[in-house]
Image: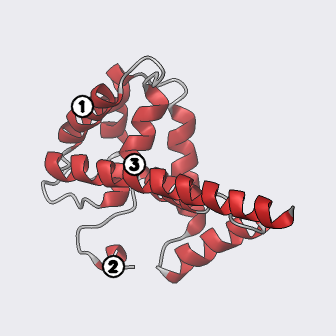
């Protein structure tokens, strides 16, 4: 909600990928499953975002990632980024979007975590995102994902043990 009121904030494909990824990760295990799309729409609408625009932008960029390589990613992002100003708005959601994009492009089975983070930060600087914040935000996001997965595992084990 706060983002939508920032003067220089614009919904971008990277932001859209980040918002979808964030929502997907943190609703993992949510029941009933058929409510997830309704929940996404409600959250977007309540914050002034059009869920169809977010989904469309995110899906379009995700589909493009199938043919984009690391070498032509910056050229592609530059072609879809209509905000060439220096006061480009950055949020943690942008870092998450960039993280998701880079994981899709880089073969993460063949690259270690430190190298992955270095590539993301290098690309973040090209886009104009603050290096230190991107690094911190991605680290925090990865840590939160790990904690959520651990919590889901504990909940699952508790449910199994109570049903016996």
Q: Position of residue 102 (x, y in %)?
A: 40, 34
Are dots 3 and 2 in contact, CB under 8 Å? no
| Residue 16 in view in this figure | no
The residue located at (70%, 57%) in the rendering is 157
Q: Residues within 10 Å of mark 1 (few under 14, many from 20)?
A: few
Helix, strand or loop under label 3: helix
| Residue 13 in view in this figure | yes
Q: Position of residue 6 (x, y in %)?
A: 26, 75
If you read the primary sequence from the N terminus, does the residue marked by circle 1 or circle 2 appear first?
Answer: 2
Q: Is residue 82 left or right of residue 122?
A: right
Relative height, residue 140 to residue 159 (above, below): above
Helix, strand or loop under label 1: helix
The residue located at (36%, 24%) in the rendering is 112
| Residue under pointer 1 | 118
Helix, strand or loop under label 2: loop
Q: CA distance from mark 1 to mark 2?
A: 29 Å
Mark number displayed over residue 142: 3
| Residue under pointer 2 | 2
User: In front here: 78 or 162?
Assistant: 162
């Amino acid at each position: 909600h706060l983002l939508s009121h920032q003067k220089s904030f614009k919904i971008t494909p990277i932001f859209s990928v980040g918002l979808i990824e964030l929502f997907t990760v943190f609703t993992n295990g949510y029941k009933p499953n058929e409510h997830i799309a309704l929940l996404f729409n409600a959250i977007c609408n309540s914050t002034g975002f059009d869920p169809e625009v977010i989904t469309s932008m995110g899906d379009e960029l995700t589909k493009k990632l199938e043919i984009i390589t690391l070498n032509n990613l910056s050229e592609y992002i530059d072609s879809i980024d209509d905000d060439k100003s220096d006061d480009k708005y950055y949020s943690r959601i942008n870092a998450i979007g960039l993280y998701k994009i880079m994981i899709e492009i880089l073969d993460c089975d063949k690259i270690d975590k430190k190298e992955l983070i270095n590539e993301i930060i290098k690309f973040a600087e090209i886009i104009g995102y603050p290096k230190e914040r991107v690094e911190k935000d991605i680290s925090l996001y990865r840590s939160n994902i790990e904690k959520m997965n651990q919590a889901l595992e504990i909940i699952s084990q508790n449910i199994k043990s109570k049903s016996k």
